[in-house]
C-alpha cells in the first residue's frame, strides 16, 4: 500500500462536449462498459498499489461521492468539493496544504496502459518539479504532402506524427509546485504547465503503449466498442 503518494484526479468539469451523455451526470461518471470512466482510472492506480485517492469534484459532485461512498473499503477515496465553476488550477490550488510531498495528478477523461511504477522511477531520476506522461501526436485527418508545383507526392491516412508529443494527462509533481505558482490562467494546462515547461522544470515520460482521451461522444463509443470486444488495452487490471 503506497499511501505516501496521493493521487489527485480532476473531476469537476461539466463535460459539455459529451452531451447528451452528461445531461444528468458529471463527465467522470460517463460509462465505458459497466463502469464509469473515473473508475477505470482509479483501477489503474489500484493495480499499481496507489490507494490514497483524492477526487476534486464540482459539477454534480454529489453523484460521484455517493457512488464511491461504500466502494473499495481497502482504499482511501475522498471526494473534495472544489466548486462547480472552478477551473483546474483553482481546484488544485485549494488542496495545496493537503497533499503528500510527491503526488500524482490525472485528468478524469484519459485512459492508458501506463506503467505508473516506471513513470515514478523515471521522475525520481530527473531534477525539476514534476513529470508529465507524453504520447505521440496522432491526427484523425489525412495528411497530404505536395511540392512547389502543387502536385501531391504523398498521402498519409491518420498518421502518427513522431516529431511532436501530446500531454497525456498523467503527471507526478512534488509540493514545490505550489511555491512556483502564478495565476496567468485558472486553467492548469494553459497557465502553470506552460510556465513549468518554459523554465525546464518538467521531465517527459514517453508512453508508447495505449492512450485515448474521452472528450466526445464518438470517443466514448469507440472505447465502449473496445470494451465490448474484450480489447480494452488500458484495463491492465483485468489481464
Image (cartoon, helix red, strand yellow):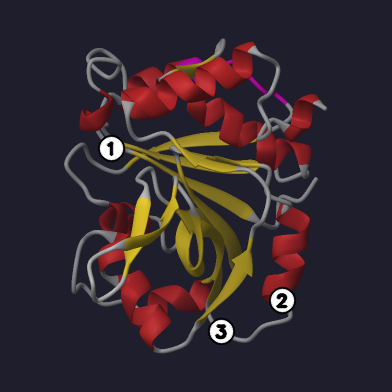
Crowd class of label 3 (few under 14; some 14 to 19; many from 20; radius 10 Å): some
The image shows residue 198 at horizontal and vertical percentages of 37, 86
Q: Residue at x 54, y 16 (%)?
A: 225
- 170 horizontally vs 49: left or right: left
Q: Residue at x 21, y 61 (%)?
A: 186
Judge whether residue 72 is colored magenta.
yes
Span shown in magenta: 67-73
**Residue 69 in sight in this render:** no
Q: Residue at x 23, y 66 (%)?
A: 150
Residues at marks 2 and 1, CA–CA distance in whole angstroms: 31 Å
Name the residue tied to disc 3: 128
Number of residue marks: 3
- 31 horizontally vs 188: left or right: right
Residue 13 has which mark? Answer: 1
Residues at marks 1 and 3, CA–CA distance in whole angstroms: 29 Å
Residue 157 has which mark? Answer: none
Judge whether residue 188 is colored magenta.
no
Residues at marks 3 and 2, CA–CA distance in whole angstroms: 9 Å
Q: Which quarter shows the C terminus?
A: top right
Amino acid at each position: 500500500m503506497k499511501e505516501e503518494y496521493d493521487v489527485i484526479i480532476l473531476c469537476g468539469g461539466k463535460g459539455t462536449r459529451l452531451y447528451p451523455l452528461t445531461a444528468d451526470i458529471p463527465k467522470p461518471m460517463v460509462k465505458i462498459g459497466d463502469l464509469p470512466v473515473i473508475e477505470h482510472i482509479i483501477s489503474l492506480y489500484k493495480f499499481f498499489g496507489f490507494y490514497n485517492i483524492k477526487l476534486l469534484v464540482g459539477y454534480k459532485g454529489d453523484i460521484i461521492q455517493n457512488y464511491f461512498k461504500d466502494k473499495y473499503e481497502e482504499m482511501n477515496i475522498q471526494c473534495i468539493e472544489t466548486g462547480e465553476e472552478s477551473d483546474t488550477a483553482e481546484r488544485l490550488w485549494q488542496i495545496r496544504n493537503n497533499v503528500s510531498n510527491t503526488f500524482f495528478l490525472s485528468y478524469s477523461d484519459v485512459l492508458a496502459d501506463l506503467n505508473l511504477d516506471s513513470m515514478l522511477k523515471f521522475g525520481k531520476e530527473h531534477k525539476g518539479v514534476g513529470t508529465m506522461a507524453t504520447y505521440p501526436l496522432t491526427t484523425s485527418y489525412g495528411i497530404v504532402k505536395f511540392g512547389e508545383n502543387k502536385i501531391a507526392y504523398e498521402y498519409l491516412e491518420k498518421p502518427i506524427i513522431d516529431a511532436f508529443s501530446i500531454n497525456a494527462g498523467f503527471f507526478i509533481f512534488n509540493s514545490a509546485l505550489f511555491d512556483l505558482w502564478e495565476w496567468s490562467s485558472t486553467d492548469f494546462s494553459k497557465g502553470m504547465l506552460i510556465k513549468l515547461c518554459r523554465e525546464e522544470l518538467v521531465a517527459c515520460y514517453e508512453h508508447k503503449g495505449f492512450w485515448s482521451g474521452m472528450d466526445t461522444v464518438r470517443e466514448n463509443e469507440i472505447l465502449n466498442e473496445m470494451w465490448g470486444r474484450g480489447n480494452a488495452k488500458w484495463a491492465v487490471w483485468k489481464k
